[in-house]
Amino acid sequence: MSLMDWVVLGLGMVSIAWVNWYFFFASRGPRS
Amino acid sequence: MTVASPELQTERSTLMVTGMTCAACSGRVQRALEREEGVRSAHVNLMTGQAEIVYQPEVVTPDVLVSVVTATGYGASLPEPGSDAIADAEALDQARSNELHELASKLRFAVVAAILSMVLMPFAEVSEGLMADPMMRLFAPLADGLRSLVPFLDSLSPSAWRWILLAVTLPTVLWAGRHFYTRAWTAFRHHSADMNTLIAVGTGAALVFSIAMTVGGDWFGAQGIRPVVYYEAVNTIIALILVGNYLETRAKRQTTGAIRRLIGLRPKTARIRREGSDHEVALEDVQVGDEVIVRPGERLPVDGEVIEGHSSIDEAMLTGEPLPVSKAQGDEVTGGTVNLTGALVFRATRVGRDTVLANIIRMVQEAQGSRAPIQALADRVSAIFVPVVISVAIATYVVWFILAGPPAGVRGLAAAVTVLIIACPCAMGLAVPTAVMVATGRGAERGLLIKGGEPLQRVASLDVIVLDKTGTITEGRPGVEAIQVAEGVDQAEFLGLAASLERRSEHPLGEAIVRVAQERGIALIEPESFEAIPGKGIRGRLGGRLVVLGTIRFLEEEGIETQRFDAAAKELSAQAHTPVAVAVDGSLMGLLGIADPVRGTSREAVRALEGLGLDVVMLTGDNRYTAEAVSREVGIRSVISEVLPDRKLDEVRALQASGKVVAMVGDGINDAPALAAADVGIALGSGTDVAIESADITLITGDLMGVARVVRLCRQTMAVMRQNLFWAFAYNVIGIPVAAGVLYPVFGILLTPTMAATAMAVSSVSVVTNSLRLRRAT
């Protein structure tokens, strides 16, 4: 695997973690 | 949400909400309303597009509630002041028609842009995978034709063509597909995600990538990366999803057809008689007490009681009953039915939102938007589905980037976009609500008012049907079925004496005697004295003669010789008749056999219910002999007799305790506790408020056959729901891995974003179409 592959893999994992954190764990947003 | 003290006054308001496409949308609007201070409760109905809100008027106003909804990205408006259920339904229908119209314009635009972009794509730099797309292959000959017709086109550089394609795509994204992005953004801000999120992220990624390639094409070329654009995919996805949305909205409009047809039953004007002359007035101006005139062939505008004329009335549209019903003075008539033969004058008793028709429309509306418990499954899946799909799409990109050959980034992007598009959970959101809607609408057309998704689901799993006897299996209106008089006694005189005395009593058996005398044209006289002995009989003087009327035992207590009628009395009892003895001046003149006749369809209905695999039980307060006589007549094997009204409830509970799902069928008001205790309460009767409120299901016809029809309809509906959910899940379970490319290494099968959009549209439309099959349900 090239350095670029490792970078994409790392970014991908961070993105997945963020998506799941944002939709499942982050606060349910401001009062509307 | 604030917890208000109970003494704080609350008000109820209904808002019309537009732009909601799936359960996530209605959920979001509902949560926003619930979070607003002063709102006690909010229920947003996806199908009817209405939000029912209970709020504290001193804390929050309806206008604020409208702005709360619009802040979530949807449209909201208040209903016209003074409107009723019918006006609301008309307004909703109009709103949906406008929505459909707007969607059609957007769709036309997007389709033109999609075709144009596919024809023009080959002029821009063609990507390797481009011609693998069957849609692109379809349009390739058009591009070739264009080339030969206008050779000038080839002289433009691929770079220039990319700019032209961008110009074609931007209006589609900014106008036709704009709502996908605005709604996705609103959802995102609330930490939630729905189908709009998937469409927005999918097309957004393709668009951003293409714009980068268009703007920096030369730079990428210098780096050895061939510029590739996906404008045709963006246009086609938006066009195809709009096709799906359009067909879905149109089908949803069809599912409310039942309500539209019910509204259509109401004439716009009424002819009323005021101060001796006839006036044609708007329907809204008819008031309780007005004398309404209807000519043959006209529809009745409101409910009322006939005061003049005689006619037959077609009530089929309201009750499903095909035979016309004859009406004369004193009979009740219902708005929306058709006067067939003669002119009628009736006094309006219920107008506006109180009419039977308005009640039915309101009930059907509420039922159509209600949730079936099976929906919870779809909701649970939808809630976690979208973030999971986004994760899968990211993983797809990463895997393609690392494992695929060049151009790895481009192919990874295509696969990721395909995953996002194929996973749109529209079909899942539509699976249950559309079926509930069509089924309740279909039921209403046949006089079967089902209160919503929950009773609908419970009916489908019933084991036992408990039928109340009086008023359910029987007419509930006792009649004189047999008259036996002593030798030398004139039957007319005998009836005349009995009826004259009974006229003063309020007993239902007495009413039967008075009715039969009146039917036979026998003149009644006024008694000089009258005395009722509760539970036994009555006594009084008529023309100087002492008349005693009541049970055999009562007459014996009065010292009257009854032996010669003993055999006759026993025979009447065995036939389920109640014997009433009549004596004049101490001598027994004869017996009247009074019985509550069995409804014509009861036997057939019992057989139909047993044919559906249900246990049928008869419950009655009558004595064992009467109960057994009736049960023999209609073919019921299990009978529970001599049950006092307050014990009916216990009998229902006892059946439930044995693990059975029990439905109680009764005539509404009397059986209310048992109806409420049963898993499903089915009321026979008219569409009046009380009957509708007290039961899960109301059969307007008062015909037991309706119970069998309801059971069949609910079972068919559950079958449709299960099919819908199965296909919606199966579609995603199969579609997502294929879109990600799991079949590519072995079989070389790979979906394109356009193919994914087509599949998605097809799945939504097939679910709605499957539900629409229920329109023909029996």
Image: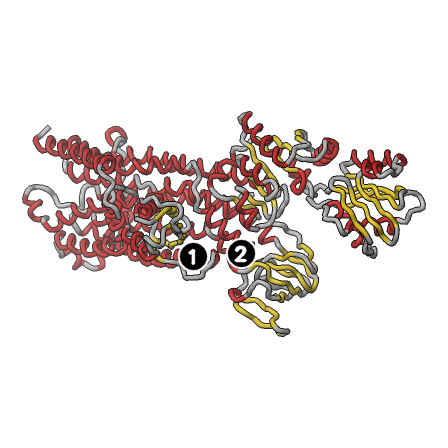
Q: Are marks 2 and 1 on the same chain?
A: yes
The answer to whether one can see residue B717 in this image is: yes
Q: Is residue B292 above or below residue B645?
A: below
Residue at the (68%, 58%) spot, across then down: B330
Residue at the (14%, 38%) spot, across then down: B407
Residue bearing the label numbered 1: B93
Answer left or right for B173 relative to B341.
left
Disc ID at residue B354:
2
Mark 1 crowd level (few <14, some 14–19, many ≥20, 10 Å Cα): some
Q: Nearer the viewer, mark 2 or mark 1?
A: 2
**CA gap, disc 2 and disc 1:** 21 Å
Mark 1, secondary structure of its residue: helix
Disc ID at residue B153:
none
Report the amino acid beneath label 1.
Answer: Asp
Quarter of the image for the N terminus of chain B: give it: top left
- Residue B588 vs residue B154, the one in the foreground: B588
Residue at the (67%, 40%) spot, across then down: B470
Q: Looking at the picture, how far across and down is residue B457, in whole percent?
A: 48, 37
Mark 2, secondary structure of its residue: helix
Q: Is residue B265 above or below residue B725?
A: below
Answer left or right for B746 relative to B163.
right
